[in-house]
Image (spheres, rainbow, N blue to C red):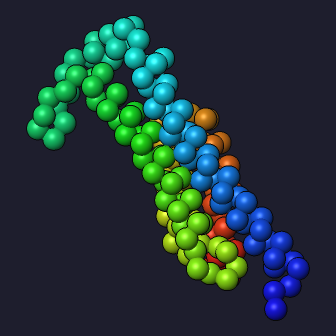
C-alpha cells in the first residue's frame, strides 16, 4: 500500500514534470515566433550579414543564415524535448504514474548545457531558466529513481 506522503511527493513530481514539459514547448514556440518576427527585421539581418561569410562543414553561409537556422532549430528542438516528456508522462505504465527515470535524466542533462551556455555565452535568462528547469525535472528524476 502506498502511504500518503509518498503519494503526495509523486503527485508533486508529476506536476513539476508536466509544467516543465509545457515550459519547453512554450519556449520553443516563443523562440520560433520571435525568430520569424522581431529577429527577422532588415536591421538585424544586415548586422549579421556584416560579419561576412562563414565556412561551416565545407559550406559557405552568411552570418544571418547561420544564426536564423540555429535559432529555428533551437525552437524546434525545445518543442521536441517538451513533447517527448509529455508523451512519456501519458504513456507510462508505472503504477505510481511517474516516467522511466531516463526521461527526466536526459532533460536534466540538456538543462545542464543550457546553464553552462547561459553562464559562459548568453547570460542570465538561460542561466536562471536552466536552474528552474533543474527543479522541474530534478524532482521527478529523484522520485522515479527511488
103 lies left or right of 65: right
Inspect this view and state whether residue 106 appears.
Answer: yes
The residue lying toward the viewer, choosing from 19 and 87, is 87
Quarter of the image holding residue 88? bottom right
Residue 44: quadrant of the picture = top left
Viewer-nearest residue: 131 or 39: 39
Q: Residue at x 41, y 11 (%)?
A: 41
Question: Which residue appears at 61% of the width and 35% of the height?
Answer: 125
- Residue positioned most to the right: 4
Q: Is residue 113 above or below residue 55?
A: below
**Which residue is at the far bottom?**
1
* Foreground of the two, 48 or 102: 102
Left or right: 90, with 135 as reference point: left
The image position of residue 24, as x and y in percent, is 56, 47
> Is residue 119 something one can see in this rendering?
no
To which quarter of the image does residue 4 belong?
bottom right
- Furthest residue toward top: 43
- Residue 113 in the image: x percent, y percent? 48, 51
Tell me if residue 17 comes above or below residue 114 in the rendering. Answer: below
Residue 140 versus residue 124 in the image, above or below = below
Q: What residue is shown at x 45% (from left), y 32% (from top)?
A: 32
Seen in the image, is 92 located left or right of residue 69?
right
Quadrant of the snapshot with the N terminus: bottom right
**The C terminus appears in which quarter of the rendering?**
bottom right
Residue 116 as seen in the image, left or right of residue 67: right
User: Residue 85 location in percent, x, y?
Assistant: 54, 60
**Residue at 14% across, 29% down:** 60
Above or below, 2 against 56 in this view is below
Q: Position of residue 59 (x, y in %)?
A: 13, 34
Amino acid at each position: 500500500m502506498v502511504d500518503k506522503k509518498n503519494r503526495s511527493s509523486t503527485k508533486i513530481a508529476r506536476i513539476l514534470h508536466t509544467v516543465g514539459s509545457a515550459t519547453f514547448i512554450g519556449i520553443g514556440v516563443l523562440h520560433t515566433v520571435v525568430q520569424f518576427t522581431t529577429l527577422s527585421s532588415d536591421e538585424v539581418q544586415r548586422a549579421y550579414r556584416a560579419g561576412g561569410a562563414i565556412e561551416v562543414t565545407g559550406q559557405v553561409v552568411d552570418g544571418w543564415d547561420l544564426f536564423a537556422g540555429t535559432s529555428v532549430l533551437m525552437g524546434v528542438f525545445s518543442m521536441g524535448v517538451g513533447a517527448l516528456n509529455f508523451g512519456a508522462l501519458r504513456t507510462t505504465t508505472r503504477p505510481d504514474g511517474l516516467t522511466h527515470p531516463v526521461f527526466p535524466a536526459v532533460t536534466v542533462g540538456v538543462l545542464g548545457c543550457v546553464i553552462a551556455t547561459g553562464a559562459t555565452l548568453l547570460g542570465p535568462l538561460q542561466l536562471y531558466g536552466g536552474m528552474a528547469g533543474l527543479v522541474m525535472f530534478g524532482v521527478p528524476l529523484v522520485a522515479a529513481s527511488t
